[in-house]
Amino acid sequence: MLSPNEMWITWVSSPQRFWQWISIPEARFEGVPELLSVCWFEVRSRISTRYLSPRKRYSVYIVFKTKNGCPGLGDVPVEVEVGLVGQESSQRFIYFVGPSDRRKEREKKDVMKPDKREDGWMEAELGEFFNEASCDEISATVLENKSQGFEFRPAKSP
């Protein structure tokens, strides 16, 4: 898992306005950013494929917690993308919570919903990629709340 310190987060350097760094006992990292107010939300990260096993398909997940239903962001489809740097990325939309009651009738069927993990955190799959030769960089982008980081792991076989 990549830590929040290895991610580029818009406005994270504006403490007490948009983000704050907090400590959560069950988090893998000492500090995680908590979103206070949504103005513009963008989180980006990269990882070299040399840290991953070659000739294997991987899924990329954002691991997060929400607070109070994630006002202003939880029930809105958020654009995400994953891909090799310099090449076309796969794009999809995810929810951080899901559509509110008033939006259920307009819910998009192709928007991915988060799953609750055994450790109490939520996760949403951003996409998949195949690590051919371990000589590239993978980019993950979320245009996102309280994020523990990005997780790269072998994809589930179909």
Image (cartoon, rainbow, N blue to C red):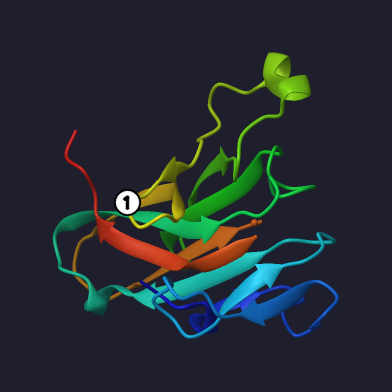
Residue 31 sits in quarter: bottom right
* Secondary-structure class at tag 1: loop
One can see residue 88 in this view: no
One can see residue 8 in this view: yes
- Residue lying farthest to the top in this orientation: 105
Q: Nearer the viewer, residue 85 or 153?
A: 153
Quarter of the figure with the C terminus:
top left
Q: Nearer the viewer, residue 52 or 124?
A: 124
Residue 142 location (% of width, % of height) = 59, 57
Q: Residue at x 32, y 63 (%)?
A: 152
User: Which residue is denoted by mark 1 in the rendering?
Assistant: 118
Q: Residue at x 60, y 40 (%)?
A: 95
Kind of residue indicated by mark 1: Glu
Q: Residue at x 35, y 57 (%)?
A: 119
Q: Is residue 74 above or below residue 19?
A: above
- 74 vs 6, left or right, is right
